[in-house]
Amino acid sequence: YQIFQMILDARASEHSARMVAMKNATDNAHQFIKDLTLEYNKMRQASITTELLEIATAQMALGQ
């Protein structure tokens, strides 16, 4: 009975360790997605700002 209990404990411990590792991987993936989304939005906003500045500069150059 003790050997069987030790095997069960070992398997439970292994499953627990895998579960923790997968949770950490999932959390890291979610954070990575958030970071990439933020970077994308910053680049997109910079592109929009640049385009608006170019339009405003062109209008000023044309004297409008």
Image (cartoon, rainbow, N blue to C red):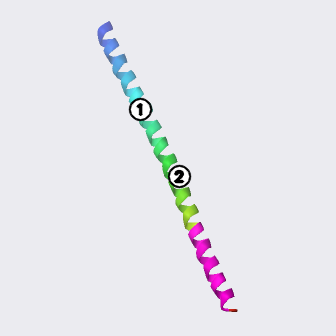
Q: Please tell me whether the stretch drawn in magenta is mainly helix, strand or loop.
A: helix
The quadrant holding residue 55 is bottom right
* Span of residues in magenta: 46-62
Picture coordinates of residue 60 (x, y %)? Answer: 69, 87
Above or below, 12 relative to 38:
above
Above or below, 12 relative to 52:
above
Q: Which quarter of the rendering shows the C terminus?
A: bottom right
Asked whether disc 2 touches disc 1, contact meaning CB atoms under 8 Å apart, the reply is no
Q: Quick one: label 1, few (<14), some, or many (20+) residues within 10 Å?
A: few
Above or below, 57 relative to 1:
below
Q: Is any part of residue 41 visible from this angle? A: yes
Q: Secondary structure at mark 2?
A: helix
- Give the number of the mark in front: 2 or 1: 2
The residue tagged 2 is 34
Above or below, 15 relative to 59:
above
The residue tagged 1 is 19
Which residue is situated farthest in the front direction here?
61
Q: Secondary structure at mark 1?
A: helix
Q: Earlier in the sequence, mark 2 or mark 1?
A: 1
| Residue 32 tag number | none
- For the residue pair 20 and 29, the one nearer the viewer reads as 29
Which residue is situated farthest in the top direction here?
2
Q: Amino acid at mark 2?
A: Lys
- For the residue pair 4 and 18, the one nearer the viewer reads as 18
Q: Residue at x 41, y 32 (%)?
A: 19
Direction from residue 35 to residue 3 in the image, left or right: left
Q: Is residue 50 magenta?
A: yes
Q: Amino acid at mark 1?
A: Met
